[in-house]
Amino acid sequence: MKKLDTLFIGFMLFSMFFGAGNLIFPPFLGAGAGTNFWMGMLGFVVTGVGLPVVVIFAVSLVKGGAVAMADRVHPVFSTVFMVAVYLCIGPFLAIPRNANVAFEMGITPFLPESANTALILFIFSVIFFGLVYFISLNPSKMERYMGRLIAPTLLVSIIILITVGLFKMDTSFLPPTESYETGAFFMGFLEGYNTMDALASLAFGIVILNSIQKKGIKNRTQLTRYTFKAGIIAGILLSAIYVGIGVIGAKMAGQGTFEDGTDILSSAATLLFGQSGTLLLGLIFTLACFTTVVGLTTACGQYFSNLLPKVSYKKVVLLVTLVGFTLSNLGLAQILKVSVPFLVMTYPLLIVLVVLTFFSRYFKNVKTVYGFAMLLTSVFALISGLNAFGLNLGPVQDVKNMLPLASVGLEWIVPALVGTALGLVVSQFSNKNIEVNEDTKIKAL
């Protein structure tokens, strides 16, 4: 495969990753972290960039992709987990979030106060999802539309904003807010969940593999190598942009109080470019959100049409588009309210599954190890998710709070390690029993 093809596939992966969350959270982190910016951003990059690239790599290593990875735990777990992931990175959460952010940043700033926002959102959604549906029907042409056209336009727009911002803004970083005073790295680590990119990697990995296969690459080793290269290209671009808009956020902290990252970037664009800055930012958000929605819609179409052979790819894409269209008209605040608890529950499971995938050769893919590790991880991930919904579980809560790293939101790590150790011990005893039975059979003969 030509180097230019690898580059464009890397661009396509970047454009699929780079959506609403990738623009909203880094500047808000910068404003909060202040003088602790670099530690906070390092944590953010670990889960917002490093983990997605690692997941992409893990998916390419396993024949059958993400589904085969989850099957190593149990087929039922695989189906439930993957369906939940696809629904949430697809029509129930990430897709409407991106469409809504595209509207709020690309259209709302230009509306008069007397405008009927609900009606205009409806019209915008019709056009937005109509284009999504059109491109998603032809996944083979995604590289042409997204890798060669939309992604470069998006990159140039972001580079202009970051470059001008870094040169024109000479304000110093303020002291960190309370959340980032101590443990800035861990705070950034948890904030990286919000991009949803690691979950999206489970879906995008198959899309990227299919794109590479269409270039004539069939050998598993070569597929893995080219997939990893595409992931590295996307990861470098994401990291550079996160740092750039994060620094802008840190420099904007002294300009006032901001509700979220979109508010920070809007103020920064207006400060730097005036009214044309609002137009530039609107273009960035609209392109970023659009490419991500196309990528997610395509991934959902491929997964559910394989899971349900009687339902065609086109029908799944149509259904995903219609659900995303409907939910996007509910408003961004309601969508974001649901996302945090879900991410707190699913990210630990994903991280443990990927780590076990990389070390599987050392325990020969024994299901017992996967089962115990995922079981104990899921218990505490569920507790954390319920906490994020505002529920206090009494004595169970006290147990969770006593665990190491609970203060930084990583209480699931010790249970995951304990579960892995239990699985290894149980699997060893099982193997010994098998060996004893085989010896007995031999002696009997």
Image (cartoon, helix red, strand yellow):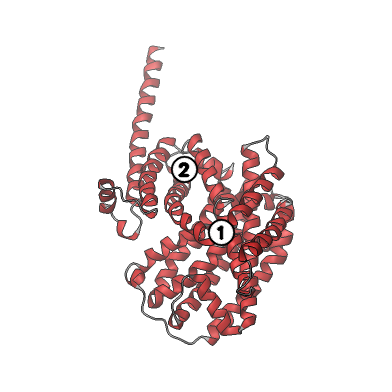
Q: Is residue 65 above or below residue 249?
A: above
Q: Secondary structure at mark 1?
A: helix
The dot on residue 256 is: none
Residue type at mark 1 is Arg
Q: Quadrant of residue 168?
A: bottom right
Contact, mark 1 vs mark 2 (Cβ under 8 Å): no
Q: Position of residue 83 (x, y in %)?
A: 54, 43
Q: Would you say residue 334 is visible in this rendering?
A: yes
Q: 386 or 148: which is nearer to us?
A: 386
Q: Position of residue 418 (x, y in %)?
A: 32, 44
Q: Quadrant of residue 274?
A: bottom right
- Left or right: where 155 falls relative to 140: left
Residue drawn at the location 67% of the way across and 47% of the way down: 317
Instruction: Please tell me whether mark 1 or mark 2 is closer to you in this view.
Output: 1
Q: Which residue is mark 2?
A: 361
- Quadrant (top left/top right/bottom left/bottom right) for the N terminus: bottom right
Q: Is residue 190 above or below residue 395?
A: below
- Left or right: where 79 falls relative to 373: right
Q: Is residue 208 above or below residue 314?
A: below
Q: 265 or 291: which is nearer to us?
A: 265
Residue type at mark 2 is Arg
Question: Label 1, label 2: how many angstroms apart (C-alpha)?
Answer: 39 Å
Q: Position of residue 70 (x, y in %)?
A: 50, 41
Q: Which residue is mark 1?
A: 97
